Image: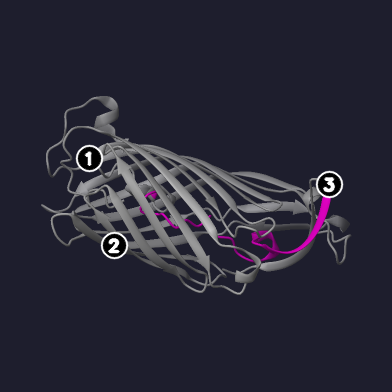
Amino acid sequence: MNASYVMYRINISSKTIIVLYLVLLGITSTAQQNPQFSQYLQNPLVLNPAITGAEDFMDFTLGYRNQWTGFQGAPKTGTLSFHAPTRLLFGTNRRAASESHSGIGAFMYADETGPIKQSGYYLSYAYHLQASEEWFVSLGTFVGGSQFSFNANDVELVENPNDILVQNISNTNFDMSLGIYIYSKHLFMGIAANQIFDQEIPYDVQNGALISGSLPRNYNALLGSRIQADRDWTIIPSGVIRTVENAPVQWDISVKAEYQNRLWGGISYRNEESVYALVGFRIWNSFSVGYSYDYPISEFSNNQSGSHEIVLSYRIFGGSNKCGCAVNSL
């Protein structure tokens, strides 16, 4: 992930701390990706709107990530999502085992990284077309708004304190994402494009000049499988690739083992950044808790103590699951 370095002071509890901060600002001609998550299988709408309503239940998910713990001004991100097949929401009859269907939902997030705050609020829709007896192809979209703000009061430059580029910024834009998701009971894959309008963030500087930056488009691709090892154990290998203009490609590869659909654990690697472990459990087949810890291996590993992420999920089932999807893999 590309970045620029800025020296600044943050006032916290009447103490002034000087830190070297990693600012991910599109307005400084570097690129910013959407917030990253380790438990993307437990919180799938963070990746792709086409997953909306894929399985035969209503899903409510709350997620929180504290990244780079101990590093002043490190990212903190919260998410809240809901999605379901439309037939569950509007009381239509249960669909057949292999039948095209649609899903609707909502997704919101808030991310704070030092003086930078981002948030997004979206409605989602996906149509799941039965392509064959075992396969579905889904097309989905997020439609909503995103907000970007930079609080110059939280920043005091150590060098060049009168830099005209450091000023308050607040910008709200219409936003949209598109995705495609292809899945069966044993294999799932998808591609999504976010911030597709490449929205500008204008801000004025001295001498009458107008400078603007942008929140560039970014893309991700997901691939995974659900392998039934025996009656009790299921192995779920998966991987995700994220890319954004003018930034290195980032990828994760993971292996998760699940016992009787109630307990799971896994290990993952994120290129040039971290190795992370995840664990979780499900109660009453409806409520689940997932936790992950990222152990840093990057050049900043000595300045932080890793990242923590927790995901809480509650599902309301509409009877026996009759969809042709990778059941409970996401």
Q: What secondary structure is marked by label 1?
A: strand
Q: Are marks 2 and 1 in contact (CB under 8 Å)?
A: no
- What amino acid is at disc 1? His
For marks 2 and 3, the one nearer the N-term is 3
Residue bearing mark 1: 101
Q: Position of residue 30 (x, y in %)?
A: 64, 66
**C-alpha distance separating marks 2 and 3:** 49 Å
**Is any part of residue 244 visible from this angle?**
no
Q: Which residue is mark 2?
A: 224
| CA neighbours of label 2 inside 10 A, class few (<14), some (14 to 19), many (20+) | many
Which percent across, then down, holds residue 119? 58, 44
Give the mark toward the camera: 3 or 1: 3
- Residue type at tag 3: Ser
Q: Position of residue 285 (x, y in %)?
A: 26, 39
Query: Which residue carries the number 3 mark?
Result: 14
Q: Going 38% across and 40% down the picture, which residue do you hit?
A: 313
Residue 38 location, quadrant? bottom left
Marks 1 and 3: in contact by CB < 8 Å? no
Q: CA distance from mark 3 to mark 1?
A: 56 Å
The residue that appears at 88% across and 61% down in the rendered structure is: 161
Residue 74, disc: none
Amino acid type for the residue under numbered disc 2: Gly
Q: Which residues are magenta?
A: 14-43
Magenta stretch contains residue 25: yes
Precedes in sequence: disc 2 or disc 1: 1
- Please tell me whether mark 3 sits on a helix, a strand or a loop: loop
